[in-house]
């Protein structure tokens, strides 16, 4: 998400609204004594930046989302089926969700739940390794809710787009909301039949009944929750096939005619840009690709898996760079997810570096030149250098801003450019490709990336990584730091 290239994050608006509700179970189950004595799964997965993100004791395998959106009210209602497996014996578990819940069923039985802020706590004993189908029913006004300083609902009377980072799922479906738990996604959205719905993956069905249309999209590969999205409104849609995969792009008709034409021209470059990235990184990790340009005032782009979303960006070279950035995230961020939010530079640094490398290979300055210019232009006392890139929010308080600060993107990209100087083009290319391939469908952190860089290059790179990503100071101008 190239926030520094476009505009400040628009989501930090309101204080969190406490949400408390509960429902008693209409049926009781005769759980075993072992289950009854088991602890409740923890309310967080253990990420210090967002302690209540994700949930301990469960592994979600699939989400089946069925939502209806009423534009005139701003109301979202529906139900989501969550297929999960207990990773230990638990007496219950949590899901991350903001909207008021009316009913929860586990394997067809209504169960007791409690809802506080964004934690939906469900009483349902599960044995270690036991699977369950959890159905949550809900209805509310997502525009009224906030979490972690984010008010993320983006909509007007004609269009809605569920896109944001690091959180988005809790505004429209209950989730185990952390990059450590990726799952299959099936998304069915009901809106008036004169509107269209675009989401991740491939469209598998559209049914019209009584003036309403339900459109279902399904992703073929698992994803982490914040990468799931949907957009509903009036769109110009183009589709085709390139390099053996289908592409779908969409542009909001809420833009003027001339702007629609420019935006569609940019979106249609997506297959060619993916082809270029494949030549640099390796095989594209998903079966579908595309993009969507909204008319809503979002102010940033986001790497939703298989279909990034963008604001209207005009036809400047910076617009193409932004598309390169979000498509690069399909490898770095989507296929290879971060282990924790402190590692966000591994997503944004690679996407930023590849923006610059695209410029280098298309008639612009070398990445090394861009890196050295930035290094020389920013004095040592500037706040740009006064942070640790590999731990951008060490106080663990209000972390949304710090993890998307300029230094995460730009120092992250500069560090990779300097690493290319330090280990040489051949080893750097091998490192890039192996990081993307070896960890595809998994997670990674800074220590693991350094270990791979050292293995590929045969060099001790501890002082290099300390200087560039672990020190709150400007790296020394030395050959060992990829400078000098």
Image (tube, rainbow, N blue to C red):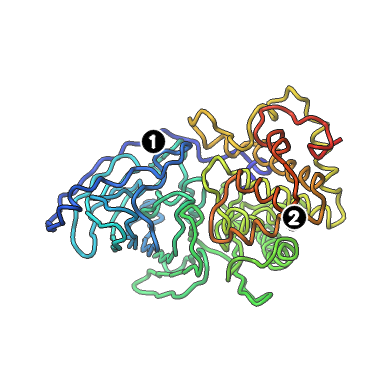
The local crowd at label 1, few if under 14, some if 14 to 19, many if 20 or more residues have their Cα within 10 Å, is some
329 vs 73, left or right, is: right
For the C terminus, which image quadrant?
top right
Residue 59 % position (x, y): 38, 56
Question: Helix, strand, or loop for circle 2?
Answer: loop
Q: Which residue is at 50% across, 63% downward?
A: 199
Horizontal and vertical percent position of residue 258: 69, 59
Horizontal relation, residue 454 to residue 177: left or right: right
The residue singled out by tag 2 in the image is 315
Q: Nearer the viewer, residue 77 or 18?
A: 18
> What's the mark number on residue 256?
none
Question: Could you tell me which residue is drawn at 52 percent across and 68 percent down?
Answer: 201
Marks 1,2: beta carbons within 8 A: no
Is 384 located above or below residue 458 in the figure?
A: above
The quarter holding residue 435 reads: bottom right
The answer to whether 126 appears left or right of 43 in the picture is left
Query: Residue 298 in the image: x percent, y percent?
Result: 57, 47
Inter-mark Cα distance, 1 to 2: 38 Å
Query: For mark 1, what is the residue?
Result: 16
Q: Which element is circle 1 on? A: loop
| Viewer-proximal residue among 301 and 283 | 283
- The vertical placement of 100 against 391, above or below, is below
- Left or right? Give the position of 114 relative to 464: left
Q: Which quarter of the figure has residue 309? A: bottom right
Lower position in the chain sequence, tag 1 or tag 2: 1
Instruction: Provide residue 49's location: percent of width, then percent of height.
Output: 48, 37
Crowding at dot 2, Cα within 10 Å, few <14 / some 14-19 / many 20+, comes out as few
Q: Residue at x 76, y 45 (%)?
A: 419
Instruction: Work out whether residue 118 or residue 396 is closer to the camera in this orientation and state it.
Output: 396
Residue under the point 29% across and 40% down: 116
């Amino acid at each position: 998400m190239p926030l520094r290239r476009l505009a400040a994050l628009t989501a930090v608006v309101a204080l969190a609204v406490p949400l408390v509700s509960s429902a008693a179970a209409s049926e009781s189950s005769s759980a075993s004594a072992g289950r009854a004595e088991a602890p409740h799964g923890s309310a967080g997965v253990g990420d210090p930046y967002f302690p209540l993100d994700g949930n301990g004791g469960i592994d979600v395998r699939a989400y089946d989302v069925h939502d209806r959106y009423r534009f005139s009210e701003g109301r979202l209602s529906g139900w989501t089926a969550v297929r999960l497996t207990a990773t230990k014996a638990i007496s219950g578990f949590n899901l991350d969700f903001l909207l008021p819940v009316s009913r929860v069923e586990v394997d067809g039985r209504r169960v007791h739940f409690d809802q506080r802020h964004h934690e939906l706590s469900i009483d349902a004993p599960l044995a270690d390794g036991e699977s369950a189908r959890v159905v949550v029913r809900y209805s509310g006004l997502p525009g009224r809710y906030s979490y972690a300083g984010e008010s993320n609902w983006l909509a007007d009377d004609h269009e809605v787009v569920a896109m944001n980072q690091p959180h988005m799922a809790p505004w429209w479906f209950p989730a185990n909301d952390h990059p450590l738990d990726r799952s299959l996604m099936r998304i069915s959205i009901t809106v008036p039949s004169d509107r269209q719905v675009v989401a991740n993956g491939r469209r598998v069905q559209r049914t019209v009944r009584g003036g309403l249309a339900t459109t279902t999209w399904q992703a073929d590969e698992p994803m982490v929750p914040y990468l799931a999205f949907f957009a509903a409104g009036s769109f110009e849609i183009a589709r085709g096939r390139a390099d053996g995969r289908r592409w779908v792009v969409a542009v909001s008709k809420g833009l003027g005619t001339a702007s629609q034409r420019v935006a569609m021209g940019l979106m249609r470059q997506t297959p060619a840009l993916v082809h270029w990235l494949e030549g640099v990184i390796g095989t594209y990790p998903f079966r579908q690709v595309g993009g969507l340009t909204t008319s809503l005032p979002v102010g940033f782009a986001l790497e939703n898996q298989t279909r990034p979303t963008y604001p209207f960006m005009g036809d400047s070279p910076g617009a193409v760079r932004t598309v390169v950035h979000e498509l690069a995230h399909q490898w770095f961020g989507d296929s290879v997810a971060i282990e924790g939010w402190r590692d966000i530079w591994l997503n944004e640094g690679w996407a930023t570096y590849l923006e610059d490398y695209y410029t280098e290979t298309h008639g612009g300055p070398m990445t090394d030149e861009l890196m050295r210019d930035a290094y020389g232009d920013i004095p040592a006392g500037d706040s740009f250098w006064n942070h640790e890139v590999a731990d951008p929010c060490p106080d663990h308080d209000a972390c949304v801003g710090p993890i998307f600060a300029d230094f995460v993107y730009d120092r992250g990209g500069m560090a990779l450019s300097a690493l290319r100087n330090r280990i040489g083009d051949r080893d750097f290319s091998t490192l890039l490709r192996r990081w993307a391939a070896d960890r595809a469908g998994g997670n990674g952190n800074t220590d693991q990336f350094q270990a791979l860089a050292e293995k590929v290059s045969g060099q001790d790179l501890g002082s290099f990584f300390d200087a560039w990503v672990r020190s709150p100071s400007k790296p020394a101008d030395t050959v060992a730091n990829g400078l000098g």
